[in-house]
Amino acid sequence: MTCKVLVDVNVFQDVITKRKNWEGSQKVLRLFDEGDYEGWISSLTRVIIYFLSVKRVGEEKARHLVADMTRSFSEIPLRYVINKEALESQLPEYEDNLQLVSAKQFHLDAIITRNKKHYQQPDIPIYSPEEFLDIQGQNSTKGKIAVPFLDLKAQHHQVYNEIDDRITDIIANTSFILGKHVEEFEERFAELQGAKYCIGVSSGTDALHVALMALGIGPGDKVIVPVNTFIATAEAVSLCGAEPVFVDCDQYYNIDVEKVKELLERENQAPKNLITKARKYESTKARSETRITNNDSRITCIIPVHLYGQPANMDEIMALAKEYDLRVVEDACQAHLAAWRMEPQRNDDKKDIPPQYHLPELRGKPQYHLPSYGAPIAGSTLLSDRRGTASRHLRQAGRARITLII
């Protein structure tokens, strides 16, 4: 577990001025450069470093020095509540109070400072640079380290300031529904996926729901889903008025293609050439649809789910889809940029729309996760304009675009 530490500006000041014991402060800063610890600074640190440096090295070098000394640190912004609590504190030194309150709000593990006496009765451990180096040396000799089962905060240090800036911009511009940030995400994610369309929606369930609706799945349809998946896969089918049909998983915990084949042989006995369908899509109106089949209800779609870094067997699934005239919607919540036989898991001329949504463990690479950030539906360059447009209209209650009048 990474130790999260706020470094007082006076530690940087030691190194800049090379005053007494500055070597210990320099060693501490190098620990954060090496990535052994998670370093944080208060909102005033960069400003103070700049003013301490500009008279010594000049304007241009001072700017470079600030960037160089703080490149491994994330900054805790000066929130209203932080400033208010620091100003109301009975302890001396507003600047130190600011750093103490910042560290507590972000649940940091310690503060490193040259002026321990300024932090009276703190609720967080306070160390001098030399004391912290001693503790670091002791911990390095220990054989076991406690690792938490789940530590989403471990991602904060790398991306916090970038995320915070974007959220601040969203609030400042009241871009709470769609807006420029959603459009930018859609364009960049579609490009990353090699897709023509990416449509941001509010959840993974909505991603699946909209995809199925755009394909005309509704009452009278049955949709194959694996038993080993999150409830959203089957829930999206039910939301369309269709019926989920569950199939067991294989040794890789993905849908068992042999069992799918057995099911189709039992359920859909009519040859493909005896099944006639007439579908009509209108981009801004409710879907109207008629079917002529030999059964009242028929399997018309399959949703393979790619799990645990292992895509489902898409070769055999697509062969069955072709044989039985099935729509294919890939639930790729854990398969962003995954590949099947070196082909990206995205839409091609045989597949329909793969809905995708964010999970923090995606691809084994840490990502910042907020549950309300939404879910993209990505279709490939060969996805028809009609289906891409239909999906966008469905997201916006049938409208081509949303105009906000303020």
Image (cartoon, grey):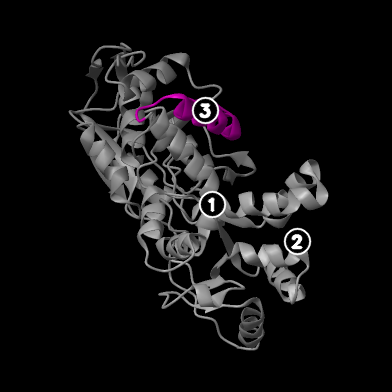
User: Which region of the structure is painted magenta?
Assistant: 176-197
Residue 147 place in picture, x, y as percent: 49, 75
Q: Which residue is mark 2?
A: 16
Membership of 185 in magenta stretch: yes
Task: Give the structural element (helix, strand or loop) at label 3.
Answer: helix
Q: Nearer the viewer, mark 2 or mark 3?
A: 2
* Nearer-N-terminus badge (2/1): 2
Q: Which mark is residue 182?
A: none
Q: Which residue is mark 1?
A: 43
* Nearer-N-terminus badge (2/3): 2
Membership of 22 in magenta stretch: no
Q: Nearer the viewer, mark 3 or mark 1?
A: 1
Q: How many callouts does the rendering have?
A: 3
Q: Quadrant of residue 85?
A: bottom left
Q: Which residue is mark 3?
A: 184
Q: Are marks 3 and 1 in contact (CB under 8 Å)?
A: no
- Decide if residue 23 is on the left or right side of residue 204: right
The amino acid marked with disc number 3 is: Glu
User: Which residue appears at 58% of the width and 65% of the height?
Assistant: 8
Residue 63 place in picture, x, y as percent: 73, 45
